[in-house]
Image (cartoon, rainbow, N blue to C red):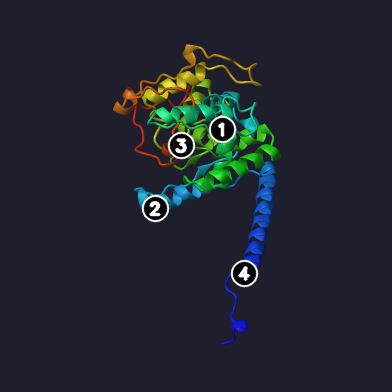
Amino acid sequence: MNESTVPVIFNPKKILIFFLKSVKWFLIISVGLTLFYRFVPVPYTPLMFWRSVTSIFTEEKFVGIDKSWVPIEEISKSMQHSVIKAEDYKFYQHYGFDFEAIEKAIQYNKTHKKKKGASTISQQTAKNVFLWPSRSWLRKGLEAYFTVLIEALWPKKRILEVYLNVIELGSGVYGVEAAAQKFFKKPAKKLSNAQSALMAAVLPNPLRFRIDKPSRYISNRQKKIMGRRSPPPVVAAVQTVESKDVAEIKPIETPEEKSSEFFSLKFDNEEEAESPKIEDTGTEVPMND
């Protein structure tokens, strides 16, 4: 065969063109989808499908998707404040990344076996809405990209609204409205301070910790959330809660929680959050005030 007729299998120019076209379409689709979700409720997330599909192989019964989207005006202020106090105290001050918290987490993780995360509400929203549940550098990179996108294209109010409507709050339960109806038999707009703090306390591992059967660990975390000052710009809200508003909960203390000395509000191990363990057990929490 003549050398000139040998087909060229590796063509750097074609590969480069294909790569550039792929990047272009990824940018177009990702920006377009982000703009779309600025105005339209997020119907489903990759995590919702992932939990349902994997339940077929890992659970005794199929786990469905219980969700109900509501505008942020239909979510109590106490619920909004509780998740900010628990997950991202500087939510209104940063642009998607809390670099001070990241630095503290890095230093902490160097000397502690139990790892501390530093993901903001913006990062968690980006991960929940656009990405699959896994731990890899690729996903972390995409998470950072989508975090920048939503911070640039969505107002803070919208980020919080989407977050509160898609977060996982129990097996097959997504969003504060569905959780409020399931665990407290009331809409999210009528959640009390104690109930809001309890729901925020199980984040970000609601499959391990339970709202309906909180342990002493979760009860203590709930009280810390309730006692913390509301962050700017919501400082005009109620800063502290009277002790009578605390739910009458007498949780069971597990050996693991008894030995734990790590009770800061932003304590969570991201690996645990994405790889749920055996659910917490405790006594039933009252479903109503």
Q: Is residue 72 visible?
A: yes
SS for dot 2: helix
Q: Nearer the viewer, residue 110 or 76?
A: 110
SS for dot 3: helix
| Residue 280 place in picture, x, y as percent | 36, 32
Nearer the observer, disc 1 or disc 2? 1
Identify residue for label 3.
Answer: 270
How far apart, in angstroms, are the residues tagged by discs 1 and 2? 31 Å
Instruction: Name the N-terminal-most of marks 1 and 4.
Output: 4
Rendered position, 192 above or below 62: above
Instruction: Name the N-terminal-most of marks 3 and 1.
Output: 1
| Residue 43 place in picture, x, y as percent | 59, 47
Identify residue for label 2.
Answer: 56
**Residue neighbourhood size for the residue with mark 3, other residues' Cα within 10 Å, grouped as few (<14), some (14–19), many (≥20):** some
| Residue 94 place in picture, x, y as percent | 64, 29
- The number of callouts visible is 4
Residue displayed at 63% across by 17% down: 235
Label ID, residue 120: 1
Tell me which amino acid carries mark 2.
Ile
Label ID, residue 128: none
Residue displayed at 57% across by 43% down: 143
Query: Residue 284 vs residue 64: left or right?
Result: left
How far apart, in angstroms, are the residues tagged by discs 3 and 1? 12 Å
**Residue neighbourhood size for the residue with mark 2, other residues' Cα within 10 Å, grouped as few (<14), some (14–19), many (≥20):** few
Label ID, residue 11: 4
Instruction: Name the N-terminal-most of marks 2 and 4.
Output: 4
Nearer the observer, disc 2 or disc 4? 4
SS for dot 4: loop
How far apart, in angstroms, are the residues tagged by discs 2 and 3? 24 Å
Query: Residue 167 vs residue 285: left or right?
Result: right
Q: Are marks 3 and 1 in contact (CB under 8 Å)?
A: no
